[in-house]
Image: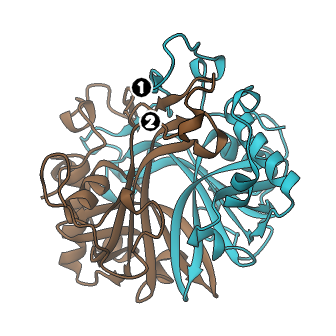
Chain colours: A brown, B cyan
Amino acid sequence: MTDRKGTAVRKTAPSNRSRLRRKYERGRYDKESLYEILDSCLLAHVGYVLDGAPVVTPTLYWREGNHIYWHGSSASRMLRKSVGYEVCLTVSELDGLVLARSGMHHSVNYRSAMLFGTAHKVTRREDKIERMRIFVEQMFPGRWEQLREINEQEVKATTILGMPIDEAAAKVRAGGPVDDEEDYGHPVWAGVIPFVPKTPGEPVPDDRQEPDTAMPDHVRNYRVARKVT
Amino acid sequence: MTDRKGTAVRKTAPSNRSRLRRKYERGRYDKESLYEILDSCLLAHVGYVLDGAPVVTPTLYWREGNHIYWHGSSASRMLRKSVGYEVCLTVSELDGLVLARSGMHHSVNYRSAMLFGTAHKVTRREDKIERMRIFVEQMFPGRWEQLREINEQEVKATTILGMPIDEAAAKVRAGGPVDDEEDYGHPVWAGVIPFVPKTPGEPVPDDRQEPDTAMPDHVRNYRVARKVT
């Protein structure tokens, strides 16, 4: 199968649980579709199991090649309870509201990526620093070198988790409503209310900023999409 | 404890797992804070446990009083595997990026609500229709009456889950970076890149719309925030 641009699109799931049961025509299992969603968003919701019950925590993430990473304080319960355990990391963006002629066919336009796997911890000091450098540089090119240098205590206080993007599914809905054929004549407005893509506003300098501090390009021209190599 | 407006703010958690371990100063357990976050967002991430492993699914939700609801196809694995089981429903909005003088103190401004509970199914036909009516009316006032009427097959094909908002925590971060005192002189731009709140763009009428169909107020003046009674 190929998409509109003629690129091969993987339509078979890498595992049973990542296989879409319903609306499978919205599913994509190829890396390109997954990466596109991951690189255009910032926030993930990570699910883990605590005493047999699910917990879903929002967190930033970043992608390096075929690996996904997230991080936080070494004291974080979410991170401690995820290492070596199965997690589900989901990234979703709501693109619009789809208004149909019947309540039933109302829908939303969205892009989502669901990643399954066992979280591993980045343990080597040099690897941790390099991961954090890449995380910062993907969002704010040139910033890492401008920061006060990271110290040993900070490296220890930060836990970085990661997993390969091997068991994953993307799901995308776009376009207008699909109504029952006999409802098209029903006299109600139908269509899409699209959402404006997530946009940065005017940067707000810190109160304690030196007044003559220049605003760097990575702030002035900040965009949500990340350039991943 | 009171917030800036002098309102009493509940600062103790209703349960052990909903108690914030870290950054507890960002925590709110009072209903007003929770409702404010829930009513200003649209998308939740629902976590459930499937064969011992977590699954996190994005879905719309709505609030009625102290109850939260979400819905989908009766064939949905997520809904079937949630009824009678513990779930975690998390709603998060990323409000801005916080740039500090050290990598360590970079942060994000956000609002999030995490709800724990056991999902129950709305079973009575009349209750299901009323829930769906309220869901539609909260988003698009006046629309329910304009739609082609719901039929029995559609009621059966829709599963609605709900739970009381009893075990929940909200977490909010706002404001600029908090750096180590000795870093304030470090010559790097610091501050906040705020995000523009989620905004509807120009509505796109369906291709098969009758050309003289008027655009109703609930489309023209659509706003993300919902009015919940």
Q: Report the front residue among B79 and A128.
A: B79
As drawn, A120 above or below B183: below
Q: Residue at x 36, y 47 (%)?
A: B100
Image-based side of B64 in relation to A102, left or right:
right
The local secondary structure at tag 2 comes to loop
Q: Position of residue B202 (x, y in %)?
A: 45, 20
Res A149 visible: no
Q: Position of residue A143 (x, y in %)?
A: 20, 47
Residue A156 quadrant: bottom left
As drawn, B28 above or below B140: below
Res A11 visible: yes
Q: Position of residue A194 (x, y in %)?
A: 45, 31
From the image, state whether disc 1 or disc 2 is nearer to you. 1
Q: Say which amino acid is labelled 1.
A: Asp
Quadrant of the drawing holding the C terminus of chain B: top right
Q: Position of residue A67 (x, y in %)?
A: 24, 72
- The Cα–Cα distance between marks 1 and 2, rounded to whole angstroms, is 8 Å
